[in-house]
Image: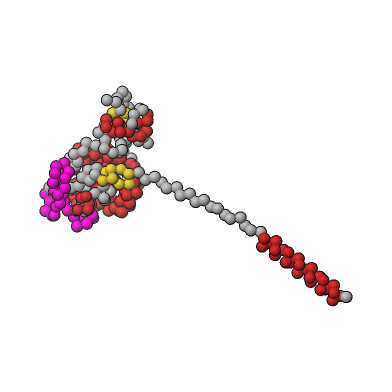
């Protein structure tokens, strides 16, 4: 009798376990659908003009800065030229390393062959077939740029400016005749502010970095046919403000690209 009861109990326990297993196995987890959305930051392109009219993207410029900024900072320590100015000039003159002169001659600053005993290459700039200096590597070009500014008397007044005064340096380079482009200072300043190149100067100067304000005559409010560029403004935002197209705004001001800088006076009407 007891044996029969034991057998029945075992059968009941086994049946119970089997039903539980079946219940567990029958539950299927719903498929998980994970939608991965990649937010790609827009990378605008711009034309960097001087000896090299080259269209580059923001990524290209940032990669160029990351690669050459250590040289610019070291030259600031050695020669006293703000690293922000060195990098801005290099970006502009070389097309962020993509320009013809870089490929032909490792020339990142558009320095011509005047008083030069080394090799040269010919390239169209202000005139056709002008001679530009040729270097064995980019490092020689950066070093020669520093020597070029430190050994010529017409640039001597720049070294009386604070090393944090990148705007003074940018305007001084144009005044001393480094470039014939009237908007050369604005282009340098725009690059420095857009890519925060002044942070390179801060890295070198550390606690000695001092912000230099614009002269009062630079930041003036214009009215009538002109607009003075303020912080955060773009050609697009200005064009919307005055109900004109960006192309018209560029034509009125002789602009070949979208680079503008704070304090720049733009014509908005004929």
253 above or below 197?
A: above
109 above or below 216?
A: below
42 above or below 118?
A: above
Quarter containing the C terminus: top left
Q: Is residue 127 magenta?
A: yes
Residue 258 location, x and y as percent? 31, 38
Front-lying residue, 155 or 63: 63
Q: Residue furthest top?
A: 224
Front-lying residue, 135 or 70: 135
- In the rendered structure, the answer to whether residue 2 lies left or right of residue 111 reads right
- Indicate the quadrant where residue 1 lies: bottom right
Residue 23 location, x and y as percent? 70, 61
Front-lying residue, 162 or 226: 226
270 above or below 82?
A: above
Where are the magenta residues, as a range? Answer: 115-141
Q: Going 14% across and 49% down the picture, which residue do you hit?
A: 122
Q: Is residue 143 magenta?
A: no
Q: Going 79% across and 71% down the picture, which residue do you hit?
A: 10
């Amino acid at each position: 009798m007891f044996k029969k009861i034991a057998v029945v109990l075992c059968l009941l326990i086994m049946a119970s376990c089997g039903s539980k297993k079946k219940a567990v196995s029958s539950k299927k987890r719903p498929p998980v659908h994970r939608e991965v959305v990649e937010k790609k930051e827009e990378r605008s392109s711009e034309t960097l003009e001087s000896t090299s009219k080259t269209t580059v993207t923001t990524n290209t410029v940032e990669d160029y800065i990351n690669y050459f900024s250590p040289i610019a900072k070291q030259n600031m320590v050695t020669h006293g030229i703000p690293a922000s100015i060195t990098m801005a000039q290099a970006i502009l003159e070389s097309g962020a390393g993509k320009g013809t002169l870089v490929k032909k001659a490792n020339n990142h600053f558009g320095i011509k062959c005047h008083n030069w005993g080394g090799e040269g290459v010919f390239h169209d700039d202000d005139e056709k077939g002008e001679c530009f200096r040729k270097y064995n590597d980019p490092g020689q070009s950066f070093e020669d740029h520093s020597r070029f500014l430190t050994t010529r008397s017409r640039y001597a007044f720049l070294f009386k400016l604070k090393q944090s005064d990148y705007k003074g340096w940018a305007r001084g380079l144009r005044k001393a005749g480094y470039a014939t482009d009237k908007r050369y200072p604005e282009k340098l300043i725009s690059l420095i502010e857009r890519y925060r190149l002044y942070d390179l100067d801060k890295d070198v100067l550390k606690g000695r970095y001092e912000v230099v304000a614009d002269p009062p005559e630079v930041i003036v409010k214009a009215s009538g046919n002109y607009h003075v560029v303020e912080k955060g403004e773009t050609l697009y935002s200005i064009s919307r403000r005055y109900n004109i197209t960006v192309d018209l705004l560029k034509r009125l001001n002789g602009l070949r690209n979208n680079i503008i800088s704070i304090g720049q006076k733009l014509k908005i009407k004929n």
